[in-house]
Image (tube, rainbow, N blue to C red):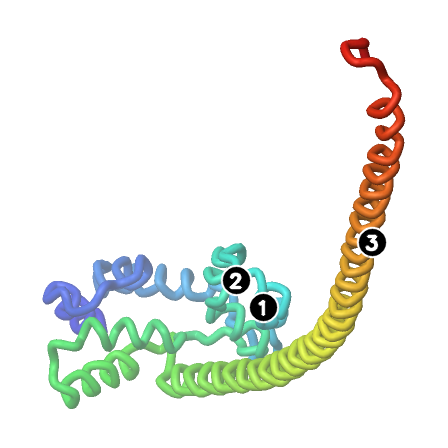
Amino acid sequence: MKGILNLLAKAKLIELSEDERRRASSELSPEALAAEAETLAERPNPPEAGIAPTAAPPPRELPSLADACQDQDGQALAGQAEERHAFEDIFAAAGVPASPYPAEKLLRLLEGLRAMDAGTRKAAVLAMDAADDNWQMVDCLRDAELKITALEDHKRQLTVQMQNREQQSAEVVNQIKRTLEDATAAIRKQIAELEQLLEREVTRAAQEMTSVEAGLRAARESASRETRRMDAEIDRLREIPMTFKAPGAAH
């Protein structure tokens, strides 16, 4: 195992952990093996499969409709950073137990061996599995399957949340449309009433203006008749001074 690890590490195909570098650099002497055995014995045992770690908070709900309205005004853009859920939180919420050899560690190893062809890469990993008693490929496979299930469940939760959100949004949009229709009908009714009121006011004003103009004409005619009557009386009275006033007398 140490020779394979050293070979891959020197070729810069993998990156060894601190424990792996320490084990790979130690000599294959009885004293070194005894010290390694004591170190492994002092390590805490991995949790059993039936014991779930501390449950993490459930996944966040999708943004509320109020938040969505704020998005339209550019006031909730900072919340986009919260859309990403840490995989560790998802796995913890699903109760995925800790694994002696997590799937992510094997993925990093495979990425380091990417220069090899698929067959050689698989053979190298299986050789490491056979040479290291601290983990087995079955542990990694089980960890990967549990995490895939947890992620699939999380995706289904997001789908359900999205369906609920779409239903809520449709209901709100329909309510907005109904409110708009009611408001439009009320405003149009008010407009019709105001038009009728305007028509009545125009008619009343026209009648009043006609009445005023008729009164003005009547007043003018009356004033004209009175003026003619005054002129006739003045002419009739002038007969006296014209008849009896001495010539050259002052008026």
The image shows residue 116, relative to residue 240, as above or below, that is below
Q: CA distance from mark 3 to mark 2?
A: 72 Å
Q: Is residue 50 visible?
A: no
Quarter of the image for the C terminus: give it: top right
Q: Quadrant of residue 182?
A: bottom right
| Residue 185 x, y percent position in the rendering | 72, 79
For marks 1 and 3 on the same chain, the one whose residue lies earlier in the sequence: 1
Mark toward the start of the polypeptide (1 vs 2): 1
Q: Disc 1 vs disc 2: Cβ atoms closer than 8 Å?
A: yes
Residue 174 horizontal/vertical position (percent)? 65, 83
Find disc 1 in the rendering and name its residue.
63
Q: Which mark is residue 159?
A: none
Question: Which residue corresponds to the image point at 85% horizontal and 17% vertical from the top-left?
Answer: 245
Say which amino acid is labelled 1.
Pro
Residue 132 on image: x %, y %: 31, 76
Between label 3 and label 2, give the one nearer the viewer. 3
Residue type at numbered disc 3? Ala
Q: What residue sits right under mark 3 in the picture?
A: 218
Q: Estimate the spatial distance between the alpha carbons at disc 1 and disc 2, rounded to whole Å.
A: 10 Å
Q: Is residue 161 above or below residue 26?
A: below
Name the disc covering residue 71, or none. 2
Q: Residue at x 62, y 71 (%)?
A: 58
Q: Report helix, strand or loop for mark 3.
A: helix
In contact (CB < 8 Å): disc 3 and disc 2 = no
Crowdedness near tag 3: few (<14), some (14–19) or many (≥20) residues, C-alpha within 10 Å: few
Q: How far apart are the alpha carbons under marks 1 and 3?
A: 79 Å
Q: Amino acid at mark 2?
A: Asp
